[in-house]
Image (spheres, rainbow, N blue to C red):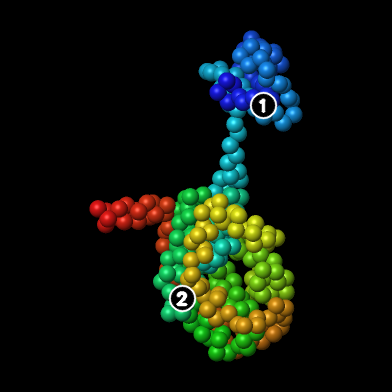
Amino acid sequence: MKDIYKEGMTFKISSKRSDHNFELDSRELNQTLGGAVFEAIPNVQVQMKNPDINLQVEIREEAAYLSYETIRGAGGLPVGTSGKGMLMLSGGIDSPVAGYLALKRGVDIEAVHFASPPYTSPGALKKAQDLTRKLTKFGGNIQFIEVPFTEIQEEIKAKAPEAYLMTLTRRFMMRITDRIREVRKGLVIINGESLGQVASQTLESMQAINAVTNTPIIRPVVTMDKLEIIDIAQKIDTFEISIQPFEDCCTIFAPDRPKTNPKIKNAEQYDARMDVEGLVERAVAGIMITEITPQAEKDAVDELIDDLL
């Protein structure tokens, strides 16, 4: 108390016994220890509600433990206890936050990332892998699944009206992610959609996109404002990576005026112009799976140090 007390501070003692053979009960401990504090610091004031210092004392069989500070952890559930989900991971701010929140609730995630070379660069792919690596701090190694998406995007661009490009793109992404989920024994699909943030994230768009699957879609950030999402991204150290200027495949073909209230009937008519099943099968057959580990980040730093030396 002498080390942490400053003039004018209030305090209280919070005692509890794990060892019930101890000679003083909790009330007697509070009185005895409070008296000792008064002897050491005569001017100190007691305050039972919201004191400046809450001196916590726990009596156990092997020792008495004293503390005055509570440091909150992330909370949540152990990763894997809630089953497996497929995280649709772009290079943006929202999807890594969605992945973190899913991990926090015990979901073991696998990251599904869509790449459209040569329209998307190797830098965009590395960005997504770096974001995945940041998430490994919260749940261990993560399987990173790269999906070849160039053929599908070119097909949509050639055969569908511009206003529906985003809707059809997201419907294909959902189909492919669901097929991967089925093969890899996942239970849900997770994404970073936030209601009303962009054209493909209106309720009408979500309905049109969801129509291609019966699998539950979890959207951990759906009701959050952008600033709330950014706040979490900064806390989990993904924000600076997310704002790197590499475009993902959702932005390279983004129309100037995307449809904000697409109709399922229209989307299905435009789908019918394409070999949907064949496109999905070829994309799933071409996936590349990499295990992302926290160690790789350390190895890269060690390699850089070696180069400098």
Residue situated furthest left in the rendering: 309
Query: Marks 2/1: CA distance?
Result: 59 Å
Which mark is nearer the camera, 2 or 1? 1
Between 201 and 109, the one nearer to me in the picture: 201
Q: Amino acid at mark 2?
A: Thr
Report whether 46 appears left or right of 21. right
Say which residue label 1 marks.
9
Between 173 and 299, the one nearer to me in the picture: 299
**Element under disc 1:** loop
Between 244 and 40, the one nearer to me in the picture: 40
| Residue at position x 67%, y 68% in the image | 197
- Residue 210 percent across, percent down from the top left: 66, 71
| Residue at position x 53%, y 79% in the image | 252
Q: Amino acid at mark 1?
A: Met
113 shown above or below 118: above
Say which residue label 2 marks.
120
139 shown above or below 42: below
**Element under disc 2:** loop
